[in-house]
Image (spheres, rainbow, N blue to C red):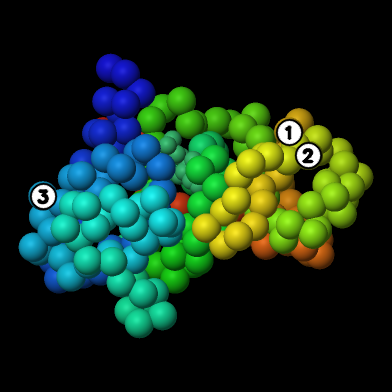
Amino acid sequence: MTRNDEKRQAAEAALAYVDDDSIVGVGTGSTVAYFIEALAGMRRRIRGAVSSSEQSTQLLKKHGIEVMDLNAVGPLELYVDGADECDPHKRLIKGGGAALTREKIVAAASRRFVCIIDASKQVDLLGSFPLPIEVIPMARSHVGRQISKLGGHPVWRDGTVTDNGNWIIDVHGLRIIDPPALETELNQIAGVVTVGLFAHRKADVVLVGNRTL
Ligand code: 5RP
């Protein structure tokens, strides 16, 4: 079984959490692309979706699924999204696709967060995957210096502009012993928009291929 097979299995398993007549929060990435494809098969049974990125919005529309404004329809019952890393407590690193800010907003506005991954994303300790942080462009160097003081190695994802017009710093070399504490600490740095640690609002259910955690 390949990673893509596992992503597709997890994405299809997530359909079981979609209620008839509901509005579904939809994340971003290659695993979510499988989910959107699967959701299209039941699009007449749902009212629509709230999207976490321009990329997912395009895909949803292409599959005939109406995209709605979170301000008009939230809170939501369900958010489905992938992750870059997932620890045994269902805490996540996200943002490999630079969509972390809208992903965090839709996750926060949803009652249940179902995370869909392949087994390569499971880790005992978060931090091998460089932690993405969305920053206001003028704060890039300042945020980088603060991160260095905390022992991380900040690398600017040069050329990437988020859907919100901001930049991404990837933080290498972290061993994240206390994810909620680090999320809180990084959130205090002036110029940080969103930290790609989903520790305070972690996943409720994790689907790894056809296994449920
Ligand atoms: C995008 C994300 C994605 O969920 C994460 O990068 C996983 O992507 P994929 O499903 O392609 O492996 O956080 O910002």
Q: Which residue lies under the disc numbered 3? A: 41
In this picture, residue 9 sits left or right of residue 166? left
**Residue 139, x across and y down, in percent:** 80, 58
Is disc 3 in contact with disc 2, using a CB cutoff of under 8 Å?
Answer: no
Q: Which residue lies under the disc numbered 1? A: 172
Residue drawn at the location 77% of the way across and 62% of the way down: 191
Which of these two is toward me, 107 or 201? Answer: 107
**Residue 21, x across and y down, in percent:** 15, 71
Q: Which mark is residue 154?
A: 2
Amino acid type, residue under disc 2 in the picture:
Pro
Q: Is residue 185 visible?
A: no
Q: Quadrant of the C terminus?
A: top left
State which tag comes first along the sequence, 3 or 2.
Answer: 3
Amino acid type, residue under disc 3 in the picture:
Gly
Rounded to the nearest whole Å, what is the CA distance between mark 3 and mark 1?
40 Å
Residue drawn at the location 24% of the way across and 34% of the way down: 9
State which tag comes first along the sequence, 3 or 1.
Answer: 3
Rounded to the nearest whole Å, what is the CA distance between mark 2 and mark 1?
6 Å
Q: Which mark is residue 117?
A: none
In this picture, residue 40 sits left or right of residue 144? left
Q: Is residue 133 visible?
A: yes
**Residue 30, x across and y down, in percent:** 37, 37
Q: Is mark 3 within 8 Å of ligand 1?
A: no
Rounded to the nearest whole Å, what is the CA distance between mark 3 and mark 2?
42 Å
Find numbered disc 1 in the image and state the secondary structure of the residue it sits on.
strand
User: From what the image shows, is residue 47 above or below residue 41?
Assistant: below
Q: Nearer the viewer, mark 2 or mark 1?
A: 2
Furthest toward the front, the residue is 159
State which tag comes first along the sequence, 2 or 1.
Answer: 2
Furthest toward the top, the residue is 1
Is disc 2 in contact with disc 1, using a CB cutoff of under 8 Å?
Answer: yes
Find numbered disc 3 in the image and state the secondary structure of the residue it sits on.
loop
